[in-house]
Image: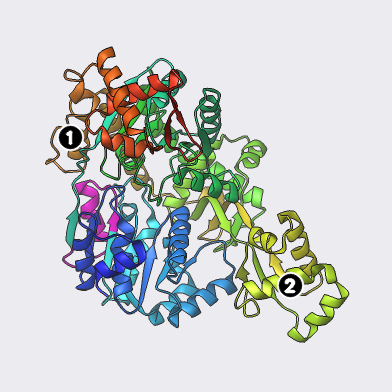
Amino acid sequence: MTPREILSKYWGHPSFRPMQEEVIGEVLAGRDALAILPTGGGKSVCFQVPTLAMDGLCLVVTPLVALMEDQLSQLAAKDIPAASLHAGLSHTEIRKVLHDAVHGAYKFLYLAPERLQTATFREALPWLPLCLVAVDEAHCISQWGHDFRPSYLRIYSLRKERAGIPILALTASATDRVRDEVVEKLALKSPRILRQSFERPNLSYRVLRVDSRSATLVGILRKAVGPAIVYCKTRRKTVEYAGLLQRAGLEANFYHAGLDRNLRGERQEAWIGNRSRIMVATNAFGMGIDKPDVRLVVHTEPPDCLENYYQEAGRAGRDGKPAMAVMLCRPGDAEELARLPEVRYPPLAVIRSVYQALANYLQLPSGLGEDRTYALDIRELSERFRLTVAEILHSLQAMQQEGILDFQEQLFRPSTVQFVSERSQLESYAEMHSRWEPFMQALLRSYAGIYDGPVPVSERQLARMIRCDESSTRKALQALHGLGVITYRPQLESPHVRFLQNRVRAEDLYIDMAAYLERKRNFSDRVAAMTAYLKADDCRASRIGRYFGDAAVRPCGVCDNCRSSTAPVADAKALAEMGLEIRAALANAAMSPRDLAARFEGREDWLQSAVEGLRREGKLSMDEMGRLVWKG
């Protein structure tokens, strides 16, 4: 099949987004490439489509566990075989995944960069039927990128051992300095650098200087039409703001990594399906989610750099229709940003104190620990050793960047089951323990290979099949485990740390301070650019473009600065006339906010004011499907 046929068959799209086809062409020609595609540019399609057009396996290197899980789920829904290597797998499970990959069971194998140097992976590498190596979040390989990961430097060894395999590096945001270092560190061979314009003509960037974030947020969302994301810096703030919006009569929910995985999934699906309009979340939300009709993204506080802001704001208006990205800024925010470098880069003495506390907490003696994973309760560590949470998190990040350990705030390992009793014994087990027999039959019918090795299972799915609750299902699985019929390992979801080196004495812990302080200076520069953006009086879109080396971005005409002297004033007569137009549009059927906004393209500000007024008057409401209904 051709790339367009593959796109149509698996994604249901008739054509590619800008730049995708050019990137795919480079891959199919066997050439290295660096693709800089902004948020919503469809980076995953750039390596997934050509892989499906070729024989062999695509190795996908990514540091984002959540993104890895999302893409695996999406591929599974398309019946495309894929697997991942992550810290939640046992050594036996990792060997099985690699064995299957070597024998052609998968088209995609996802792994974190830290896995590249493990003995098990190195042993399998020469035999993997690779056709492509895709390096996602490629800016992480650069000292000047906003999320430097030294483990990414190990990707270079792939080039040495599998020299004939093309490498596709992908990132959503990279300055010229980062771009050049990505090419150098990955040893890309005469790569074509494909960069989509940073221009988003449909997206209106706005900075609002406010006294009360809460009151302003409620006011904005009352006026807004369509799906929205509200970004907060902490989990606690997501809960507080979601509650505030709910009390104001708005459809809102909160999302953060501390929630139960099933609950996160339910809330995400409700938002994607427009059954919930507003998601209040920490900044990881939206990553890997293809929802084109987001009309509004609000940051309740300024992010620490333009790289993060551009990616998060860019989740609005992916369908090309008018959308807004609003940042709320209070007096003192700029000063708080200026203090961040000292917080994010603690002194060496603090890093060593955290390392010692971690070793004591885990009861890990010197000389041990390499490649071992440990669950970690940050709050307990903080209280027991009188360290602040910020000191712990940023010290762990420093150690991660030094290649000492790998810290993941949220590790997910699904429940697994393997039958270990002889098949001939199952009948007698069923007779002796008849209450567990339906669970045994459901497992055998639903999960292929459950005798060959541990198989991921869903307690929720089993409960539905047997028509009981999840709690009873877990008790049944635990009982069968106790009887020796199965091996059942329940789901694990918690922060964890994996040591990449054996533990040393804290006073011997080595941090390259010259590189560390250079990263601190680089971070200070990024903070300064963010602060300048807050205070700017020129076009915000052009300023973002210049920051990323795209001087071709023209004044947008729709940001707050561009509109400050030309913004129309919606008078009462104009709003009344628009109310009549809205009534006519909704006369025969309810309509989604997205479709209604499409009818009023170019008049979105007036539309928001008109809709707000009509809802206050009780003439307009929203049904359970998130559609606007005229009530008259």
Q: How dense is the environment of label 2, judged by Cα within 10 Å: few (below 14), some, or many (20 and up)? A: many
- Residue 23 point in image, percent of width and height: 22, 62
Q: How many marks?
A: 2
Say which of 116 and 135 sits in front.
135
Residue annotated with mark 2? 440
Above or below for 188 versus 107: above
Where residue 316 sits in the image (x, y, percent)? 33, 40
* Three-letter amino acid code at the position of disc 2: Met
Q: Which residues are magenta?
A: 170-191
The quarter of the picture where residue 412 lies is bottom right
Question: Quick check: is 122 in the magenta stretch?
Answer: no
Q: Is residue 190 magenta?
A: yes
Residue 93 location, x and y as percent?
Answer: 57, 72
What residue is drawn where x is 43% and y is 37%? 627
Q: Residue at x 31, y 38 (%)?
A: 521
Q: Quadrant of the C terminus?
A: top left
Q: Quadrant of residue 25?
A: bottom left
The residue positioned farthest toward the front in the image shown:
588
Can residue 405 be spotted in the picture? yes
Dot 1: what SS? Answer: helix
Sequence-earlier tag: 1 or 2: 2
**What residue type is disc 1 on?**
Ser
Residue at (64% x, 56% y) in the render: 364
Task: Return the residue at label 1.
Answer: 542
Left or right: 467 with respect to 78?
right
Residue 136 appears left or right of 82: left
